[in-house]
Image: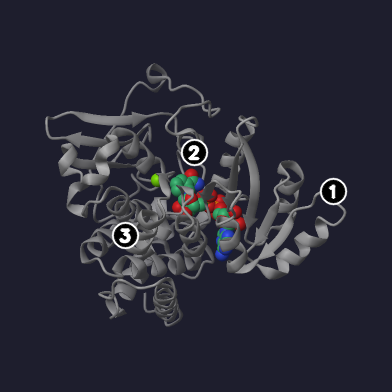
Amino acid sequence: MIGVAILGSTGSIGLSTLDVLARHPERFRVVALTANRNAEQLAEQCRRYRPAYAAMADPAAARVLQSLLAGMPDAPEVLSGVEGLEQVAALPDAHYVMAAIVGAAGLPPSLAAARAGKRVLLANKEALVMAGALFMDAVAASGAELLPIDSEHNAIFQCLPTGFHAGLAQVGVERILLTASGGPFRDWPVERLATVTPEQACAHPVWSMGRKISVDSATLMNKGLEVIEACWLFGTGPERITVVVHPQSTVHSLVQYKDGSVLAELGNPDMRTPIAHALAWPERFDSGVAPLDLVALGRLDFQAPDPGRFPCLRLAFESARAGGSAPLVLNAANEIAVAAFLDGRVSFPGIARVVEETLAASLEQSVVGQDLAGLVALDQRARATAEQLIAKQAV
Ligand code: NAD
Ligand code: MG
């Protein structure tokens, strides 16, 4: 039996992971589940999946969980805080770790899983954006298996030969084509973007996801973060990556080879496909996803992203080119700006302005080679800068 720990089991990716695992009970055992604050939901998951450990980031919520589980036979051991999450990620019985916490909070436990040499199923793209060098070094040093869950990166992984770690040029790859749905505002007049509400931004036309990544998909910051994620995963610079808007989200991404061949992975937009791929790899098994019906779909459209509409994509490319900790500052400012947008404190176009101004105000972007504590401190400073800009209504 393969033991699986799920970091962020109450989220969209966490729930899809549990759905896939439940289809293969003879193969997998859930050894740990984690959540931020929702003790009721985690308690329910513990009763159903019977893990040995349950961790909550919030210590008060962990106490509530403990009391909710009192009297349960073989109740899981309850852990809390960042240390609890890190401990769960490195458990000897957890052979596979699904890293599906949203945002910078996912970095410490995802890194702990990489350091412990696990098969890391990485959904938490922010970990690579913030700490790509540290993370990839940990993977190399421990011999961890890093499998991308982000649908685009999982598609690229499937379209690359196994020897791609030697360098993309060595295996004949010319470009990576990263597809983007374009989000809900792809065709809106740009002037109307100032009126966008959180509900409109979170109603993604194709994918059903958590609120933060839904807003990122609407600004295309999600695609920008994914460009940076792809650079680390596939050992390339941003100049080899082209973003293509593809509203149907059926082609999950493509790899263009020197000889003119372009390989793509297609499927229905359902995260259970990349999750099942990474759980079964190098084999294949059932994910519960309906087969793709190309005839019913009828057409696949592609267009270039509109830079005026999506300044976040430009900012992400600039940060990727600048390197150092620019991507970390970009990510921190974006997390603050998205939270402020969801709270009604910043307009939708204001998100890009917060990010741009925070990047301009941060003098520490060239710092590289940080340890985790150093990166977390930089992240905190960038967040404080973004908060100040919002408080002063400077954006
Ligand atoms: P979500 O908001 O639905 O769930 C997030 C999970 O993280 C929850 O279990 C929550 O309890 C936990 N969490 C939140 N804040 C935390 C904190 N401070 N400390 C510890 N745990 C915390 O998010 P999601 O849509 O499932 O996305 C998860 C990650 O996967 C993100 O990094 C996202 O970019 C990535 N991703 C998601 C999708 C998707 O379809 N949802 C696709 C590709 C990549
Ligand atoms: Mg994606």
* Residue 156 image position (x, y, % from top left): 31, 39
- Residue on which the image places disc 2: 275
Q: Residue at x 47, y 62 (%)?
A: 107
Return the disc, 2 or 3, that comes first in the chain's sequence. Answer: 2
Which of discs 2 and 3 lies nearer the camera? The answer is 2
Which of discs 1 and 2 lies nearer the camera? The answer is 1
Above or below, comparing residue 273 to residue 200 in the picture: above
Residue 82 badge: none
- Asked if residue 192 shows in the view, the reply is no
Position of the C terminus by quadrant: bottom left
Q: Nearer the viewer, residue 195 or 343?
A: 343
* Residue type for callout 1: Pro
* Residue type for callout 2: Ile
* Residue type for callout 3: Cys
Q: Nearer the viewer, residue 385 or 31?
A: 31
- Residue on which the image places disc 1: 73
Quarter assignment of residue 77 = bottom right
Quarter assignment of residue 85 = bottom right
Above or below, comparing residue 63 to residue 114 in the picture: below
Above or below, comparing residue 361 to residue 223 in the picture: below
Disc 1 crowd, CA 10 A, few/some/many (<14, 14-19, 20+): few
Tell whether label 3 touches label 2 (CB within 8 Å). no
Residue 312 badge: 3
Q: Residue at x 46, y 27 (%)?
A: 284
Q: Is residue 385 left or right of residue 339?
A: left
Note whether ligand 1 is within 8 Å of mark 1: no
- Asked if residue 290 shows in the view, the reply is yes
